[in-house]
Image (spheres, rainbow, N blue to C red):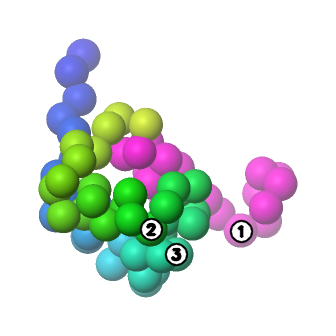
Amino acid sequence: MQTQGWTPTDLRAWRSNQGWTQAKAAEELGISRESFVNLENGKHAIDRRTMLACLALTAYLPGLPFGY
């Protein structure tokens, strides 16, 4: 099964929905702010790992035992 990748617009919408700055989103994803900006501006493709990390961060629910 082929999955569609995210566009820079999708990434920007995800960050906006989280209420995060670019710096905060980069920190949560474990990448530099510069790398995040490059993803959001379309200079680098958003790989599946990054997309899945974003979805995992969105799915996080306080109180679950994930070590946060």
Q: Amino acid at mark 2?
A: Arg
Examine the structure image and report whether residue 42 is included in the region drawn in magenta: no
Q: 38 or 53: nearer the eye?
A: 38
Q: Nearer the viewer, mark 2 or mark 1?
A: 2
Q: Which residue is mark 1?
A: 62
Q: Residue at x 52, y 75 (%)?
A: 24
* SS at circle 3: helix
Q: Position of residue 60 (x, y in %)?
A: 61, 59
Q: Which residues are magenta?
A: 50-68
Q: Could you tell me which residue is drawn at 49 percent across and 47 percent down?
A: 53
Please check the rendered image and state whether residue 61 is part of the magenta-colored stretch, yes or no.
yes
Left or right of 36: which side holds 26?
Answer: right
Q: Of callouts 3 and 2, which one flags the residue occurring earlier in the amino acid sequence?
A: 3
Going from N to C along the chain, the mark reached first, 1 or 3, is 3
Cα–Cα span, label 3 and label 2: 8 Å
Q: CA distance from mark 2 to mark 1?
A: 25 Å
Which residue is rendered at x = 44% and y = 54% of the image?
54
Residue 59 image point, x, y percent: 53, 56
Residue 3 picture location, percent across and down: 23, 29
Q: Is residue 66 visible?
A: yes
Label 1–label 3 contact, CB within 8 A: no
Pointer 2: residues within 10 angstroms few (<14), some, or many (20+)?
some
In this view, the residue in front, 54 or 47, is: 47
In this view, the mark in front (3 or 2): 2
Pointer 3 residue: 24
State the mark number for residue 33.
Answer: 2
The kind of residue tagged 1 is Pro
Nearer the observer, disc 1 or disc 3? 3
The answer to which quarter of the image holds residue 1 is: top left
